[in-house]
Image (cartoon, rainbow, N blue to C red):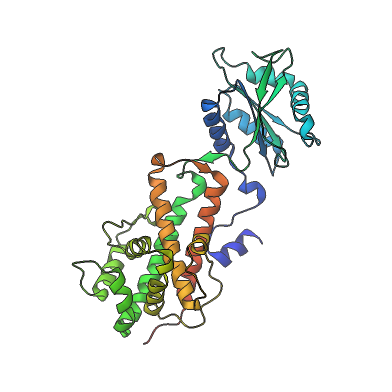
Amino acid sequence: MNAVAWESLTGVTSPGTFSDEQIAPTLLAAAIRNRLATSDSELSGFWFQVRGSRSDYAQELQKQLASDAVVVLVVRGTPFENVNAVLDDFVAILQEHQEACEKHLTGDGTTERRAVVLLARNTLRLPQVSSPVALPAWFPRLGGQTTSVVIEDLTWRAESPLNTAEAAIGDVCQLLFDLEGALSERLHAVCAQNKAATDSFWSLTRRDGDGSFADFIDGVRRSRHEVRNPSSYRPSVREGSSLVARIWGKTQATHPDGLGKPGKALALALALPESVDASWHRSLVTVLFRPSGALPAQQAFAINVLVTITAACQMITAAAHADAYPSYPVPLIRSMSFDLRQALAGARRVLLSLDHYTG
């Protein structure tokens, strides 16, 4: 499927080709530096699968690591396939690239940790255990010595903070804002024609001091016009002034097995038809938090909206405080973001496709 067709179907920017999905050399370089900073080994080996041009990737990665005692080498042929010959293959590739190793591994004379990065077509399918290896006599600083080396595959392990560009937080914010707009317009229309349909949902989300649901939704609609940058939209549960903040707070406080009630209330408030457009995407987090037992289509859709909005708000907030959380594998962050964006865009598309409500 080409990018235009994908975006037309999902409303989310295309995930692109394999090469487009590759972790950027800047991120891999940062992950390598982080590992070297905490490594107890004088020599580390890192393996990374490159789906595009390995030579181009190696050139850019080496540039990013220019100030570090790290050499980036391209694995060609079929070495590293026999567990009993891993270290022989490692020494052989060092010998093959002696000039590059001497150039990039010399360091500034004070560097104690060195690393060899191997770029390959495939992931490393061998056990990643530390083993002794006798290094060539010419090898910078460690020449002629026997040292322990472990070759770690970073293909799925290269980590980054939650606010990495790969998380596309701005897109998550924008899609969350857009979905809230579709929700508020639909709820406003239903409430105006059949207030009783929204009573159950309002009873679950209202707070002390609130007036009517109609007043709340009108306030939400007005305040949305004051949002100048939807790509930075960040609701607050504490303030609770936005619709998604109320949904976030209620869902967060509800046990997964109790989501059926707010889901049913939201489905009624949205006046969803018995047959909901099946093109919406059920987010992974919704599947993990799903209530037990089969649910009607309207209720399942509504629960997906509740949980996906909550997960998106959590991700936005965590990214804003990334320094307080661990780093995570970049492929995981990217996939989680893309999954949430698909679900947000799909839910909005369904709401916009509903017939005009007349009561």
Q: Is residue 6 above or below residue 51?
A: below
Is 122 left or right of 158, judged from the image as shown? right
Q: Is residue 285 above or below residue 103?
A: below
Screen quadrant of the C terminus: bottom left
| Residue furthest left in the image | 209
Q: Residue at x 64, y 20 (%)?
A: 104
Q: Is residue 15 above or below residue 32?
A: below
Q: Is residue 189 above or below residue 328?
A: below
Percent of width and height locating residue 216: 26, 70
Percent of width and height locating residue 26: 55, 36
In front of the other: 36 or 74: 36
| Residue furthest bottom in the image | 359
The image quadrant that residue 230 belongs to is: bottom left
Q: Residue at x 65, y 60 (%)?
A: 2
In front of the other: 351 or 137: 137
Is 23 left or right of 322, judged from the image as shown? right
Percent of width and height locating residue 129: 67, 32
Q: Residue at x 59, y 42 (%)?
A: 23
Is 227 left or right of 69, judged from the image as shown? left
Screen quadrant of the N terminus: bottom right
The image quadrant that residue 93 belongs to is: top right
What is the total number of numbered labels drawn onto the structure image?
0
Percent of width and height locating residue 20: 62, 48
Is 318 left or right of 286, judged from the image as shown? left
